[in-house]
Amino acid sequence: MELKFINEGNRVQLHPDCKEAVAGLSPWHRHAVFHRVCQQVYQSRGAAPAPADSDLSVRGVDVLRQCLSTDDAGRISNQITATLEALGPNAGAHGPVSDDPGLTITDVPIEGGLRDSLRECLPLLLNSRTEQLLESYYGSYFQIYSALAYRTHANETHIGSFLWHRDVAPMAQVHLILYLTESGPETGATMVLDFAQTTRAAVIGYHYEGLDERIKDIEEIFTETGTDPSISCPDLQPGDGLVFSAARALHRGSLPKTGYRDTFTLVLLPSLVPWRQDIEEFGDDHIFGRKFYRTLETDPFQALSPAVPIRPGDKLSFDEQWVLAGHMFP
Ligand SMILES: O=C(O)CCC(=O)C(=O)O
Ligand SMILES: [Fe+2]
């Protein structure tokens, strides 16, 4: 299928004649086609991506040291405490809001002074070195689709994203997690398996497991292969970040053994324009105020990727081999 486009300033719009064809693709495929368009636009602007030889490109995970000073990270963590305290005595500032393990994680509303601080963090997180890392991974510009902050309290029971999974998301979706508290075996962390091991797990049949099928110990499935998984779980200081490919690399959070873990996550996707331009044109409500996280069910060809309803019969079926294997493109 040849796609036609209409130029609109720095962006391109899909030609109306092609809309139906693109809408008929699977959500993964539609997002991959959009990514290809982003790569062509990037190259046509004379931007040459650096070689994709970083750990993020080759393995699917990389560490970003000292995006913020330890003091600044601690100050934001204190703002999270103040934000939750202001919501009431049982809003998750000093303990989980209930015994339900699902409520071990407290979403923090990003408003007021906390929002000002996190807005100021964006250029520190996406500094020129990280911009280069991401642009070489993508071969294109990228956008911040949304950002979320959460406080995770100590708990024995791991559920949801604290069990091994891949996010049901466009293959290009990258998460950048800024740690505001220390990360390590005692203090809570994020564990990632690289692309090669993720593919090996997919061959055995472990890939996009639903919430009820996810496991806590990935060793269980690797015993079948006679190999041990090599899990990446770097110790991080407050102010360090972790960046990983959320749909292509198996990962899970690990809960702190005492106290709490504070994190700020950026959800990144390919873009026709540099990430700053979306903010200059549209502000940052879409970043800090999003309530819709099912990024596959969005239209990447429209600015800010608004949600599009999944069409009847267009269920998310996991039968595309390239998706299961964790490839970026079909
Ligand atoms: O909280 C964590 O450490 C992991 C979160 C996660 O699964 C994700 O960002 O996709
Ligand atoms: Fe995840």
Image: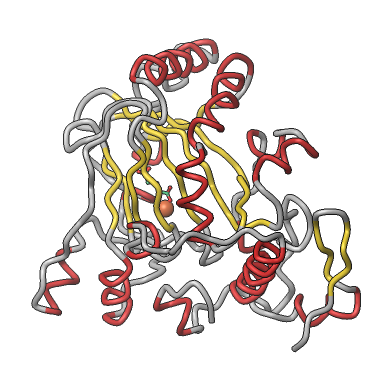
Q: Is residue 80 left or right of residue 41?
A: left
Give percent across and percent down for residue 21. Answer: 79, 82
Q: Is residue 270 left or right of residue 53?
A: right
Identify the residue at horizontal 23%, vertical 53% (top origin). 232
Towards the viewer: 265 or 258:
265
Give percent across and percent down for residue 43. Answer: 65, 65
Q: Quadrant of residue 269?
A: bottom right
Structure colour scheme = secondary structure
Identify the residue at horizontal 57%, vertical 24% (top origin). 120
Quadrant location of the C terminus?
bottom right
Q: Is residue 54 left or right of residue 16?
A: left
Up the image or down, 162 lies above or below 225; here it is above
Identify the residue at horizontal 30%, vertical 45% (top origin). 190
Query: Which residue extends farthest left?
Result: 226
Give percent across and percent down for residue 229. Answer: 16, 65
Towards the viewer: 46 or 123:
46
Towards the viewer: 218 or 58:
58
Q: Is residue 31 left or right of residue 177?
A: right
Quadrant location of the N terminus?
bottom right
Give percent across and percent down for residue 23. Answer: 76, 75
Q: Quadrant of residue 16?
A: bottom right
Q: How many marks?
A: 0
Identify the residue at horizontal 33%, vertical 44% (top origin). 63
Query: Which residue extends farthest bottom?
Result: 1
Q: Quadrant of residue 306?
A: bottom right
